[in-house]
Image (spheres, rainbow, N blue to C red):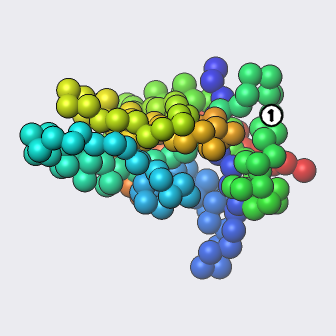
Amino acid sequence: MIKAYKYRANMVIDGKKRDTALLSKNILYAADIRKLNDPFEGSVELPKSYEHEHWVTPIIQKLYSVGIYSLSKPKNDETFPCNELLWAHYANTHKGFCIEYNLDKLSNYAQSNYDISHVLHVSYEDERPKVLGNDNVIQIQKKVFGTKSLAWKYENEVRLVFEKCGEVFTKAEKEEIESKRRN
């Protein structure tokens, strides 16, 4: 079983605790890439020649309509999500909660029941990835959504990339999702 975690702040928005409200309805929120917190998210080096512009530009533009559900994988020796930076950055400075997912079950269920493109294990690099003239759509997606700078390596991220952003309804069984709260 591959475990993956979603750290949540459970902030009050419009009079409701957004994160527990979504969780109680079995809803994942797949964010638009422009709403993620890395200002260089999706940054790639495109081919320089004009001949590639006719196919690369439309692919890149289409990629901005997808939704991303980001999760964090535990480090090798972790049995509980104990990454202090993730608790501080994504769980309301240690006041929120963390959801544990069985990534195998979640991604298998997602692939058969909703409009998912990929499960990507993020690669952390010191330079932007280069889109090559012979890259296909899948290779471009992996570079755009699956590469981040080394500064983000502490997240150890895995992503579910959906064809559309917004709320994604799950009908996951309760045993597939365990909610854990840090005391």
Quarter of the view holding residue 74: top right
Label 1 neighbourhood size at 10 Å, few (<14), some (14-19), many (20+)?
Answer: some
Residue 23, position as x, y percentages in the image: 61, 53
Residue 8, position as x, y percentages in the image: 68, 55
Residue pointed to by mark 1: 80
Quarter of the view holding residue 156: top right
Name the residue: 73% across, 28% down. 75
- Label 1: state its secondary structure: loop
**Looking at the rendering, in which quadrant would you find the N terminus?**
top right
- Counting labels gives 1
Name the residue: 53% across, 34% down. 125
The foreground one among 123 and 113 is 123
Whether residue 106 is visible, yes or no, is no
The outermost residue toward the right is 183
The outermost residue toward the bottom is 14
The foreground one among 158 and 37 is 37
Name the residue: 63% across, 60% down. 19
Please indicate whether residue 156 sits to the left or right of residue 57 in the image. right
Residue 43, position as x, y percentages in the image: 40, 48
Whether residue 178 is visible, yes or no, is yes
Please indicate whether residue 159 sits to the left or right of residue 80 in the image. left
Name the residue: 43% across, 60% down. 34
* Amino acid at pointer 1: Phe
Please indicate whether residue 100 sits to the left or right of residue 103 in the image. right
The outermost residue toward the front is 48
Quarter of the view holding residue 49: top left
